[in-house]
Image (cartoon, rainbow, N blue to C red):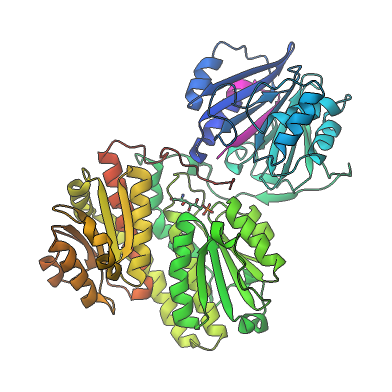
């Protein structure tokens, strides 16, 4: 969603800010803007649409400014328009603010500020911040921002400049990330590491309600009482060129092809002297043994990984497990006791609903284990233990490699729980682990020849709707397959447990209706064949994802996509890959932007 950048130093700020805004484009946005400090005060430029449009509009601006802030906005309060784009100024135009998050009490603050004579020029919640800073400003920007923040209810990541304080940016946060780096040419702030790592690999992660005062020579950190503090510094070891396509036509394809590496990296160091090792769980063996219920909370693709984990935990560890959308969990009254383990899954580690669900779980006394891809993210910081998926930065909005990283991490967790409960022996764990590691090779094999997938995609590309059907693990994989297809190709797709088709959805089937069926060799294979027959008898065009060597399936399907034989528990890893490629192939055929689907944002930081 929204993105913040800021720079103060020796170099012209304009191009640096625009370049850094471009690195945040993957998050999704609808407008962009910059505010530059110069001899005349502040120059603010905003545009609806892509950063390229902003860059073109900025061409006529001089390169004199060496300090400024920038923003990509994903509209929440106020339509996507130039006047609602950030940076947003106070009445005098001397203070400019960029803001990520939502100010919940903005309406009452707006009324109060209007009564005090402030004139509002936008429909945003953010504008109250600019006017509050204006009211509090007495020659010290940090102090004014601090005073303003005392009045805010909600979440924010902020960067602020003031015409009267040349070369200075004040940044702060509450519930929305802010990171900082000081490099040879100056000081940088952003809401995402990717926009600061070119300056330094050592990135400061600002704590909630702390402040950073950026100047060309360095960054000072303070808490809400004005006391100097030392931020947590994270060393970033992933490649800077992760933000490049590396020869692939789009990030989605590049990230799909990274999946064998993700599986290997996620498993690296997990089998030590023949024993499973997940130290980051943050739980003793006693604590693990007392767990009598597991809740898995997450959103979107991460929730689908949770549904797969539920099957594994119940089947191996025999612990009752519920996987639930975090947006639902947070408003229910779930049964949680100190012996409940809550597993929160989030690629970005920033998803607002998942964070709210974590907080609820902790208030109720549960231990929370975070599974995230982003080191130092809010999910990591608010959980009792963290397992990091080793996907590295994921740029395409549609999650692919992070999903596989999550499934592999959750599979390890299920093994660990089963072992601690005495349900799986060390010898059984070793066998499972080796088979799990082998899925990296199997995914490589699937990626090496996509002919059948592309043919099936060609046959489906002009459809209006599609069903994904499966049973057991297959039913869960289908949810992800349908989500991938709808989000990037805008083709309406639904996932159904195959046995449910005849209870309603089959009414929609007509001649040529695409039905994608996960029909791998599993305990319910024969049942799947019957379900496929039911759809086919009504005219469905069936695309089966089947196990290599299965000749019988050809009698039931119009197209067969073969995947290597793996045990059913690991089938989600292999079966997901053709579904990702299938969705991408259709999206490309329909001329869709697979990396930046309309209306979507990479991190959903608002409710
Ligand atoms: O960062 P998170 O894993 O918490 O994000 C949750 C969802 O927004 C996300 O999985 C979304 O559904 C995917 N990008 C879809 O591909």
Q: In this image, 602 relative to 158: left or right?
A: left
- Return the residue nearer the eye: 450 or 107: 107
377 vs 110: above or below: below
- Return the residue nearer the eye: 142 or 180: 142
- Return the residue nearer the eye: 286 or 310: 310
**Residue 30 drawn in magenta:** no
104 vs 96: above or below: below
- Return the residue nearer the eye: 29 or 433: 29
- Image coordinates of residue 364 in percent, x first then y, are 69, 69
Q: In this image, 134 relative to 378: left or right?
A: right
Residue 365's image quarter? bottom right
- Image coordinates of residue 137 in percent, x first then y, are 85, 26
- Image coordinates of residue 303 in percent, x first then y, are 48, 60
Residue at coordinates 62% horizontally, 23% vertically from top-left? 34
Name, please, the residue furthest toward the left: 555
- Image coordinates of residue 46 in percent, x first then y, are 58, 21
Residue 251's image quarter? top left
Does the image show residue 142? yes
Does the image show residue 571? no
Q: In this image, 589 relative to 183: left or right?
A: left
Quadrant including the N terminus: top right
Q: What residue span does the magenta drawing correspond to?
A: 1-15
Number of marks: 0
**Residue 8 drawn in magenta:** yes
Residue at coordinates 54% horizontally, 35% vertically from top-left? 74
Residue at coordinates 87% horizontally, 44% vertically from top-left? 228
């Amino acid at each position: 969603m929204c993105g913040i950048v800021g720079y103060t130093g020796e170099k012209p700020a304009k191009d640096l800010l625009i370049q850094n805004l471009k690195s945040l484009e993957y998050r999704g946005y609808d407008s962009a803007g910059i505010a530059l400090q110069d001899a005349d005060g502040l120059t603010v430029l905003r545009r609806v649409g892509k950063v390229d449009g902003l860059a073109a509009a900025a061409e006529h601006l001089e390169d004199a400014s060496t300090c400024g802030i920038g923003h990509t906005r994903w509209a929440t309060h106020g339509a996507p328009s130039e006047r609602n784009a950030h940076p947003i100024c106070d009445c005098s135009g001397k203070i400019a603010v960029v803001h990520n998050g939502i100010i919940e009490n903005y309406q009452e603050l707006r009324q109060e500020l209007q009564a005090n004579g402030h004139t509002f020029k936008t429909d945003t919640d953010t504008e109250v911040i600019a006017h509050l800073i204006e009211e509090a400003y007495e020659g010290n920007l940090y102090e004014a921002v601090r005073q303003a923040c005392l009045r805010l209810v909600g979440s924010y990541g902020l960067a602020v400049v003031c015409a009267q304080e040349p070369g200075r940016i004040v940044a702060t946060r509450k519930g929305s990330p802010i990171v900082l780096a000081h490099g040879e040419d100056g000081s940088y702030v952003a809401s995402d590491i990717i926009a600061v790592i070119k300056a330094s690999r050592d990135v400061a992660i600002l704590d909630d309600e702390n402040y950073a005062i950026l100047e060309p020579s360095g960054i000072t950190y303070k808490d809400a009482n004005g006391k100097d503090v030392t931020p947590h510094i994270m060393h970033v070891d992933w490649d800077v060129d992760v933000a490049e396509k590396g020869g692939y036509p789009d990030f989605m394809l590049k990230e799909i092809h990274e999946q064998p590496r993700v599986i290997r990296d996620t498993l690296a160091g997990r089998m030590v002297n023949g024993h499973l090792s997940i130290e980051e769980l943050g739980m003793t063996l006693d604590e693990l043994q007392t767990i009598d219920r597991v809740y898995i909370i997450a959103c979107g693709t991460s929730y689908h990984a949770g549904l797969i984990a539920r099957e594994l935990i119940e089947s191996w560890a025999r612990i009752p497990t519920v996987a639930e959308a975090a947006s639902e969990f947070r408003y229910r009254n779930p049964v949680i006791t100190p012996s409940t383990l809550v597993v929160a899954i989030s690629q970005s580690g920033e998803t607002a609903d998942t964070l709210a669900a974590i907080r609820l779980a902790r208030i109720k006394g549960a231990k929370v284990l975070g599974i995230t891809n982003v080191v130092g993210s809010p999910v990591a910081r608010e959980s009792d233990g963290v397992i990091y998926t080793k996907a590295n930065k994921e740029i395409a909005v549609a999650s692919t490699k992070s999903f596989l990283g999550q499934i592999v991490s959750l599979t390890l967790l299920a093994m660990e729980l089963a072992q601690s409960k005495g349900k799986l022996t060390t010898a059984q764990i070793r066998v499972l682990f080796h088979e799990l590691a082998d899925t990296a090779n199997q995914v490589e094999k699937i990626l090496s020849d996509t002919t059948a997938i592309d043919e099936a995609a060609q046959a489906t590309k002009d459809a209006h709707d599609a069903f994904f059907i499966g049973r057991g693990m297959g039913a869960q994989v289908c949810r992800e397959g349908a989500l991938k297809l709808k989000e990037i190709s805008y083709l309406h797709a639904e996932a159904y447990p195959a046995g449910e088709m005849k209870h309603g959805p089959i009414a929609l089937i007509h001649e040529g209706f695409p039905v994608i069926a996960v029909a791998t060799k599993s305990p319910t294979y024969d049942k799947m064949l019957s379900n496929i027959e039911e759809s086919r008898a009504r005219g469905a065009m069936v695309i089966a994802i089947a196990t290599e060597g299965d000749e019988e399936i050809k009698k039931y399907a119009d197209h067969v996509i073969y995947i290597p034989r793996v045990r059913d528990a690991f089938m989600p890893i292999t079966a997901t890959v053709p579904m990702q490629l299938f969705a991408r192939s259709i999206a490309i055929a329909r001329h869709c932007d697979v990396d930046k689907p309309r209306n979507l944002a990479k991190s959903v930081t608002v409710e």
